[in-house]
Amino acid sequence: MMRILANDVHYHVEVLGKGEPLLFLHGFTGDTSTWEEITQQLTEHYQCILIDIIGHGKTESPERYERYMIEQVADDIKNILDQLNISKVSIIGYSMGGRLGLTFALLYPELIHRLILESSTPGLANEEKRKERREADSKLADSIEKNGVEAFINYWENISLFSTQKKLPLEKRRAIRQQRLSQNPTGLSNSLRGMGTGSQPSWWHRIGDISFPFMMIVGGKDIKFCQIADSMKELNQNLVIKTIDSAGHANHVEEPRKFGKIIREFLLIT
């Protein structure tokens, strides 16, 4: 574990194992611990680099939401990799972390070996939908600041996106809840305002430009993101789509063995 200063923000970074570098980027309300069941399957042959994204976990939570803009955070990631002397990396990003990973890959394609997205999106192409999403995220951010993290998590863990997680063992659900409750309210609210799907640029027009190995893993029960993956495939036939039929949005949490097997196989053939 280490603290790395990137563009005046202290980031919590963990480096596990040795070998080809893999960078893991967690989702909203997550942190490095959410990848534990996946990295355990990989550290024998790969160097796993885990970062608490700005506003999450043990990384700092700046007061200005503008500091959370996704392109700035992508530059932070580049700064961290530079300090770790990593010149090329494969990225595995989930949901918000997938949007950040895609942004990083499009801004710095020369640094990318492979890009693996889980339940993620290039953003919103329609400006009206982007505006609606920004307004909704801003209201949600206001509610976190007004009512606190616990009230927000009570709401968040019951949205339809995570309905399939209710089938997880009680002990695992409790661990997920405790991890979410540990978050900083400023970090969560500013992440919604600065790095939300409506705030980031739409990258749909750039999907066809991707030439490095590129995969999307989706849950069969997460219909929205299955459709997003299919739409991305129409723009880039090189995109590999893997569906875990028994899972919802958080494949790596619900089906860690299946998810890990897909990752390992993709790393070996690309």
Image: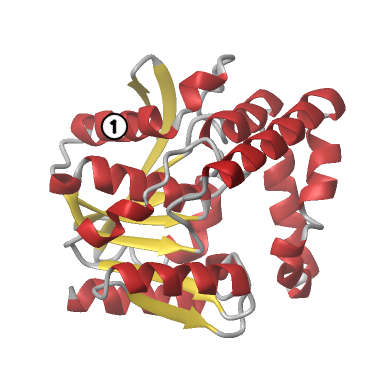
Is residue 137 something one can see in this rendering? yes
- Three-letter code for the amino acid on which mark 1 is drawn: Ile
Q: Residue at x 57, y 35 (%)?
A: 57
- Horizontal side, residue 47 vs residue 225: left or right: left
Q: Is residue 262 left or right of residue 78?
A: right
Quadrant of the image for the C terminus? bottom left
Residue 175's spot in the image, x, y percent? 71, 55
Q: Residues within 10 Å of mark 1 (few under 14, many from 20)?
A: some
- Given residues 259 and 103, the one toward you in this image is 103
**Up-down: is 33 above or below 10?**
below
For the image, the number of numbered tags is 1
Indicate the position of residue 15 as horizontal and vertical percent values: 33, 45
Measured as percent of width and height from the top left, residue 95 is found at: 52, 55
Task: Say left or right for 84 vs 137.
Answer: left
Q: Secondary structure at mark 1?
A: helix
Question: Is residue 41 in view from this perspective?
Answer: no
Taking depth in this image into account, of 137 and 72 the one nearest to the observer is 137
Q: Measuring 85% from the left and 47% from the top, which residue is drawn there? A: 154
Quadrant in which residue 232 is drawn:
bottom left
Q: Is residue 34 above or below residue 143?
A: below
Colour pattern of the rendering: secondary structure
The residue lying at 66 percent from left, 41 percent from top is 132
Which quarter of the figure has residue 204? bottom left
Measured along the vertical axis of the image, is residue 90 above or below residue 182? below
Please name the residue that numbered disc 1 is placed on. 80
Furthest toward the bottom, the residue is: 245
Which residue lies at the image location 26% right of the left edge and 34% below the top edge?
78
Provide residue 206's location: percent of width, then percent of height. 28, 52
Viewer-side residue, 247 vs 225: 225
Q: Is residue 120 above or below residue 145?
A: below
Rendered-image quadrant of the N terminus: top left
- Name which quarter of the figure residue 134 lies in: top right
